[in-house]
Every structure is written in structure tokens, then in C-alpha cells.
Image (tube, rainbow, N blue to C red):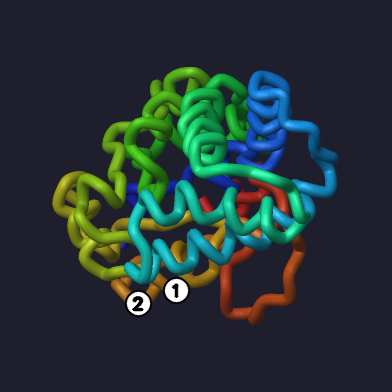
Amino acid sequence: MKIKHIFFDLDHTLWDFEANSNIAFETIFKKHHVGIDLQKFLNYYRGINQNYWRLYRNEKITKEELRIGRLRDTFVKIKQQFDYELINNLSIDYIEVLPNNNLLFDGTHEILEHLHLKYKLHIITNGFNEVQYKKLDNSGLSKYFDKIITSEDAGVKKPNPKIFKYALDLAEATSKESMMIGDNWEADVMGAINHGIDAIYFNYENKSVGENIKSVNQLIEIKQYL
């Protein structure tokens, strides 16, 4: 069946999360006069944040535990003094500042301009509602997408099959006429495939993948599949 609907992940796929997050931390550390080696913090934070998102994705922790825990654990790891008020204020300001910086992966606008003329484009994201809509608006991406599906609206997170069913129902699409594109192997690629949706792995870190998996290192390479 011909593909009619394309579902994109947002963070780490179109929106350069790491680059924008680094700028946000630099901004809020200056605001709160946190005397800290930013690069040292980021080196530890990235892995800790990824682990917290994995737990959140698998329904093991709450949004609040993610928001506070990733900062607290990083400060503990680098032996930076803190109190709860500082961690809470940083976590609030981080969410506020993050969507103000909107660096995108190379080729984002080019590939979306190409695709949205032929297909209905949608977003499926596990990110927080209050941040994701701002990212889309502030980065100029909203105009390309028909439906925005968030895990908070769906009540479950990728790779839970219920979010893919929710997305298909909202878009009035079938699994056979849909394609998922994202950077996360478990949440985006296997989550979609396990629900009968074909997938393209945005493999920007150039990891080893099986030959039977559609994979691209640059967004513009999606043209070879669609």
C-alpha cells in the first residue's frame, strides 16, 4: 500500500536537543550564579538524563521524578553543592528556557518541504506538552505538521503500542499506509514496527544496524525511501 502518512519524532530527530539543551543550561547557570564547569556537568548529565528518560518511557518514574532526579543526580556525581530549592528552580527555568533555542538538524526544513507536498506529516513525541508545542512554533516547524501526538495526551509513551494506535486514529491513517521516522531504536523504530508501521531509523550517530532496517545518517537521505 502506498505511504500517505509520515510520523516524525521531534527531539534528536528534527530538533537538535543536545545543542539546545547545552545553551539552556549555560543560560540558567548564569542566572542562578551556579559556579560549575559546564562541560563537566554536561558530560555526566547526558547519560543520566538518557537513563531517566528510559525509566520515564517505561512508566517506572513520574514526570516530576525525571525533572528533579536528573539534575540532583548529576550534581551529586560531580560533587556540586546544592539544596532542593536550587534544583527545583533550575528544573523550572530549564523547561522555560529550553524552547527559546531552536537549532535543528541539517536538512530539516529541506526534507520537510519536500515531504509535506506529498504526504500528511505528523509528530509523535514523548516530550512534555508545555515544551514541545513551543519548540515547534519557535523553530518554524508547526506549519509542516497536521497532527501533534504527545505521550501526555495519549496517556502512554512510545514504544507502547497504544500511542501508535492513538496516533493512527487521530490522523485517520492505517498502519500499512504510514511510516515512522525517529532516532530512538526502542521507542521509534521497534515501537512502530511492532505495531505494523514501517520505520526509518535516523541514525545520526552512525550505529551498526541490520541490513533489513531502513536507516539514514542525514535527514535529506530520507528521499531515497520516500
Name the side, left or right, on which 47 lies relative to 7. right
Mark drawn on residue 190: 1
State the image coordinates of residue 226 (x, y, percent, origin top left): 51, 50
- Residue 177 in view here: yes
- Residue 6 in view here: no
Mark drawn on residue 3: none
Name the side, left or right, on which 204 lies relative to 152. right
Q: Quadrant of residue 146?
A: top left
Q: Nearer the viewer, residue 221 or 41?
A: 41
Seen at 37% across and 39% down, the residue is: 121
Q: Amino acid at mark 1?
A: Met
- Is label 1 in contact with label 2 (beta carbons under 8 Å)? yes
- Residue ID for mark 2: 194
**In the depicted structure, whether residue 12 falls above or below residue 201:** above
**In the depicted structure, whether residue 111 falls above or below residue 55:** above
Seen at 72% across and 22% down, the residue is: 30
Seen at 64% across and 39% down, the residue is: 16
Q: Amino acid at mark 2?
A: Asn
Mark 2 surroundings within 10 Å by alpha-carbon count, few (fewer than 14), some (14 through 19), many (20 or more): few
Seen at 72% across and 60% down, the residue is: 77
Q: How many numbered discs sit on the rendered protein?
A: 2
